[in-house]
């Protein structure tokens, strides 16, 4: 998917990118490739693959959920900024916070935000388990996202504590994700959530399967969660 195909594909979904936004994506791609030589950000560096598998894929939640308003969004384990930075470029009104455990990635994201001229962005070098315990951030976000970070049973413990009541956790998953959701059912309930929607679709051109889950926060997460760093992944609640 080259840049113009990317623009046309988004327009088909009702997202009409300006020339300035297209330039921001071009700058994003340039910086991603340059920084990837010194910081391990992605295995995908070909332009057409980046535009499809990173940029377009990151924006797919907006095909089903309204981002055209002031929202607070926290992206857990965003790595090189996916999905939150592409969503921010498309919907400048949203305020985003990115949490990542690797300082080098946070340095890259700060540089990237400056290069793209983004406002209303914050970056935090922290483990998601610790961040979710912080009273300044716990249960304050309208939306929390995670893309290909961990299994759903792990993700719910990392992400749901950050979602405010009646907010949404949006999980971007690959193929065969339905089983993950079944296994995570008890954890979702325990942490105060309820699976309210899912969408399975194929990425254009390469026809690879993607699934997005929407988990609504119905009540507060018990204070003892998330557990200390490393435990959710080592011993997920199922």
Image: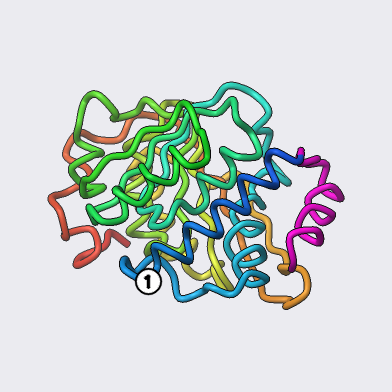
SS at mark 1?
loop
Residue 159, image quadrant: top left
Q: Quadrant of residue 225?
A: top left
Tell whether position 4 is magenta: yes
Please say if 166 is above or below 48. Answer: above
**Quadrant of the rendering where the C terminus is positioned:** bottom left
Q: Is residue 26 magenta?
A: no
Q: Residue 145 location in percent, x, y? A: 47, 46
Tell me the magenta residue range: 1-18
Within 10 Å of disc 1 (Cα), the crowding (few <14, some 14-19, many 20+) is: few
Question: In the displayed structure, does residue 202 sit left or right of residue 224?
Answer: right
- Name the one closer to the observer, 8 or 137: 8
Image quadrant occupied by the N terminus: bottom right
**Depth check, front residue: 2 or 237:** 2
Measured from the top left, where is residue 43 in percent x and y?
A: 45, 76
Residue at position x 37%, y 42% from top? 98
Question: Which residue is under mark 1?
Answer: 37
Q: How is the image coloured?
A: rainbow
Image point (57%, 53%), residue name = 213
Which of 105 and 37 lies nearest the eye of the viewer?
37
Which residue occupies 53% across, 47% down? Answer: 195
Report the number of discs: 1
| Residue depicted at 51% across the width and 70% down the height | 179
Question: Residue 86: image x %, image y %?
Answer: 58, 47
Q: Position of residue 140 (x, y in %)?
A: 37, 25
């Amino acid at each position: 998917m080259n840049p113009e195909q990317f623009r046309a594909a988004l327009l088909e979904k009702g997202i009409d990118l300006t020339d300035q936004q297209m330039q921001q994506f071009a700058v994003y791609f340039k910086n991603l490739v340059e920084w990837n030589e010194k910081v391990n950000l992605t295995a995908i560096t070909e332009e057409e693959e980046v535009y499809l598998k990173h940029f377009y894929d990151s924006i797919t939640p907006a095909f089903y959920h309204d981002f055209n308003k002031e929202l607070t969004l926290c992206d857990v384990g965003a790595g090189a900024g996916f999905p939150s930075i592409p969503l921010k470029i498309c919907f400048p009104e949203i305020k985003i916070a990115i949490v990542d455990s690797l300082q080098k990635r946070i340095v890259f994201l700060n540089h990237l935000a400056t290069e793209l001229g983004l406002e209303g962005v914050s970056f935090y070098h922290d483990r998601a388990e610790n961040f979710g315990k912080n009273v300044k951030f716990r249960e304050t976000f309208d939306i929390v996202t995670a893309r290909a970070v961990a299994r759903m049973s792990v993700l719910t413990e990392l992400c749901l504590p950050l979602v405010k009541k009646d907010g949404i956790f949006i999980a971007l998953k690959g193929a065969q994700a339905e089983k993950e959701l079944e296994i995570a059912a008890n954890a979702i309930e325990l942490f105060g959530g309820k699976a309210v929607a899912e969408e399975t679709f194929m990425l254009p051109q390469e026809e690879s399967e993607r699934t997005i889950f929407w988990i609504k926060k119905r009540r507060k997460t018990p204070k003892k969660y998330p557990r200390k760093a490393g435990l959710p992944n080592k011993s997920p609640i199922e």
